[in-house]
Image (cartoon, rainbow, N blue to C red):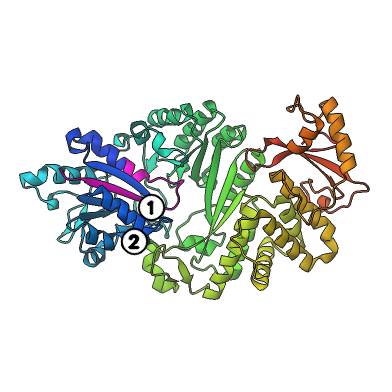
């Protein structure tokens, strides 16, 4: 019996590879168990592991056939593995599948002699027949050329019909969840995409197929019953069918277990009134939305075939934000046609003004087989020869511009997407002509001063931001010191006080805690604790600026006398992780 090893190489440990689990589960359902038990094995690695260690682990498993799931994030690693694997396991037969090898595969077969073939498109049926071929059919004289959906050295063996969504196994039920502990669980309720985005491979398959709603609900209940932390839907545009999205969201709201978070990629301009009503009073953190805006340049959107109603998109994002219960993640792509540096800064400012919880500043990846790959000459797009094939420059965006945007991306990640500097950034950005101008100046400051961006020390980033503000507005040191102190204590009850923080008014604070220990006015969840314990478990800070105000203008007005803010770390905002705060003398907020 041939030993077959299905191999996934993930970007991070918390990720999993749903493709190999789906192939395995489908094969086990459709062929005799004697052909899979003991013969079919799954294994996952990450791109952060040492290649030699992965090679050694595969060698120890002694497979006869190794099948790799290939994507832009793991292709460089997989190429190294399949170059060396035949040297240590002579005679091994290697198969490839996945979007990274589904186009221009002929060259790969020329370059890697140990690769027998490539599985094209959806692989469930193809892999099942391939497994049968190696375990029994080969003995009956069946040839690989008789299996559809393959690219062999002799050519393609035909195009397969898409798999019926109802035939796809729910592999979590079969595998059990132990294998996925501390990892994100991925789920697909649909395949295909109705849209034609030029940079995306999903634009090639415009046929959208859905799992039945009763099937989806049963699968969701499986996750809910087991209180898994997060389920990430990998549907390209989850709400492309309004009724489908509404019914799923309605079910999740009605069966919420108070723990599980569900992630969806959506088109915000397709949201309906009915869907918004369901979302409006969901538990904070029940769902989160990823929304690809990509650009606000109308000419750019037309060139990449995105028919987006930007005005309506802005309205929908604003409505969802006002619910205060749903994390929104908005995406931009630099390097698209007709988008130069100034145009991108305009797109950035317009999306930033929508106030998402995260703003992802990404760079165009020229995927093999995507429509935009065919127009690279026309658009003057030059991109990296190695995956992920990221843009280097274009007719509109120079390499210098790309490098500047890379540095700005780092600043956005550190100071916006971390949600650790919310109040400081809200005030600081008012000092500049635009938000983009602020991050641009901050990026230049980092580069000029030689500051590093990859330090794990949070206090370092706070100190650098204070230095940046002081380099421009030295007369406002007191204000920015207070803002940064407030932001730090919102997230963490620090063991040691930041060097830039003002001196504590210890006597006033001790008096407060003594009174609180006698009569719980603000810390009702801390029954039985004495004043000394309350001081350690919570934090109190004096402020001479009302840095907790939502309005940047209000934050900048100096108080006549200090106000005290109590930070309660037992109660946190489920979207931001911020501690509950109470301004003493005001109602709890």
Q: Residue furthest right?
A: 560
Q: SS for tag 1?
A: helix
The label number, if any, that marks residue 202 in the structure image: 1
Q: Secondary structure at mark 2?
A: loop
- How many marks on residues? 2
Range covered by the magenta-colored residues: 1-21
Task: Give yes or no for residue 308 being in the magenta stretch.
Answer: no
Q: Is residue 92 left or right of residue 166?
A: left
Q: Which residue is mark 2?
A: 369
Does residue 163 appear in this view? no
Q: Which quadrant would the N terminus be assigned to in this image?
A: top left
Callout 2: 10 Å neighbours few (<14), some, many (20+)?
Answer: some
Query: Is residue 5 part of the magenta span, yes or no?
Result: yes
- The residue nearer to you, when weighing 65 against 155, is 65
- Look at the picture and state if 484 lies above or below 540: below
Between residues 389 and 139, which one lies in front from this camera angle?
A: 139
**Residue 62 place in picture, x, y as percent:** 23, 49
């Amino acid at each position: 019996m041939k030993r077959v090893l299905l191999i996934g190489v993930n970007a991070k440990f918390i990720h999993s590879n749903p493709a190999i689990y789906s192939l395995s589960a489908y094969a086990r359902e459709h062929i005799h168990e004697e052909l899979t038990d003991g013969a079919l094995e799954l294994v996952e690695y990450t791109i952060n592991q040492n290649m030699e260690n992965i090679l050694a682990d595969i060698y120890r498993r002694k497979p006869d056939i190794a099948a790799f799931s290939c994507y832009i994030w793991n292709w460089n690693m997989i190429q190294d593995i399949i170059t060396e694997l035949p040297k240590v396991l002579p005679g091994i037969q290697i198969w490839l599948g996945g979007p990274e090898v589904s186009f221009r595969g002929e060259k790969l077969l020329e370059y890697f002699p140990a690769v027998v073939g490539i599985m094209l498109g959806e692989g469930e049926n193809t892999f099942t027949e391939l497994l049968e071929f190696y375990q029994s059919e080969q003995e009956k004289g069946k040839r690989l050329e008789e299996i559809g959906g393959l690219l062999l050295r002799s050519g393609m063996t035909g195009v397969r019909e898409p798999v019926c969504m109802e035939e796809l196994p729910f592999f979590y039920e079969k595998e059990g969840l132990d294998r996925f502990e501390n990892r994100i669980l991925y789920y697909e309720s649909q395949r295909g995409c109705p849209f034609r985005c030029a940079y995306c491979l999903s634009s090639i398959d415009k046929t959208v197929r859905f799992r039945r709603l009763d099937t989806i609900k049963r699968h969701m209940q499986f996750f809910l019953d087991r209180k898994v932390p997060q389920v990430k839907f990998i549907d390209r545009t989850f709400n492309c069918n309004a009724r489908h999205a509404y019914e799923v969201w309605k079910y999740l709201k009605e069966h919420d277990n108070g723990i599980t978070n569900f992630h969806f990629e959506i088109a915000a301009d397709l949201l309906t009134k009915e869907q918004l009503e369901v979302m409006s009073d969901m538990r904070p953190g029940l769902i989160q939305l990823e929304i690809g805006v990509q650009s606000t340049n109308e000419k750019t959107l037309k060139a990449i075939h995105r028919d987006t109603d930007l005005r309506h998109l802005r309205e929908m994002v604003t409505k969802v934000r006002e619910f205060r219960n749903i994390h929104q993640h908005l995406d931009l792509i630099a390097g698209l046609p007709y988008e130069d540096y100034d145009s991108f800064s305009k797109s950035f400012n317009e999306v930033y003004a929508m106030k998402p919880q995260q703003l992802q500043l990404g760079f165009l990846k020229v995927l093999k087989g995507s429509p935009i790959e065919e127009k690279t000459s026309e658009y003057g797009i030059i991109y990296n020869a190695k995956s992920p094939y990221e843009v280097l420059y274009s007719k509109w965006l120079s390499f210098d511009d790309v490098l500047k945007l890379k540095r700005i991306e780092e600043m956005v990640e550190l100071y916006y997407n971390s949600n650790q500097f919310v109040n400081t950034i809200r005030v600081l950005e008012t000092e500049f002509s635009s938000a983009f101008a602020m991050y641009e100046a901050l990026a230049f400051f980092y580069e000029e001063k030689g500051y590093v961006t990859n330090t794990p020390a949070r206090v370092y980033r706070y100190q650098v931001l204070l230095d940046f503000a002081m380099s421009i507005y030295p007369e406002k040191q007191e204000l920015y010191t207070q803002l940064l102190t407030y932001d730090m204590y919102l997230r963490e009850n620090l063991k040691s006080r930041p060097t830039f923080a003002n001196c504590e008014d210890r006597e006033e604070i001790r008096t407060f805690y003594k009174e609180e220990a006698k009569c719980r006015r603000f810390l009702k969840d801390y029954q039985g604790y004495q004043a000394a314990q309350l001081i350690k478990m919570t934090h109190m800070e004096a402020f001479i600026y009302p840095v907790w105000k939502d309005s940047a203008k209000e934050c900048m007005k100096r108080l006549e006398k200090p106000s005290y803010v109590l930070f309660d770390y037992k109660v946190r905002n489920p979207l931001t992780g911020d501690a509950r705060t109470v301004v003493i003398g005001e109602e709890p907020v």
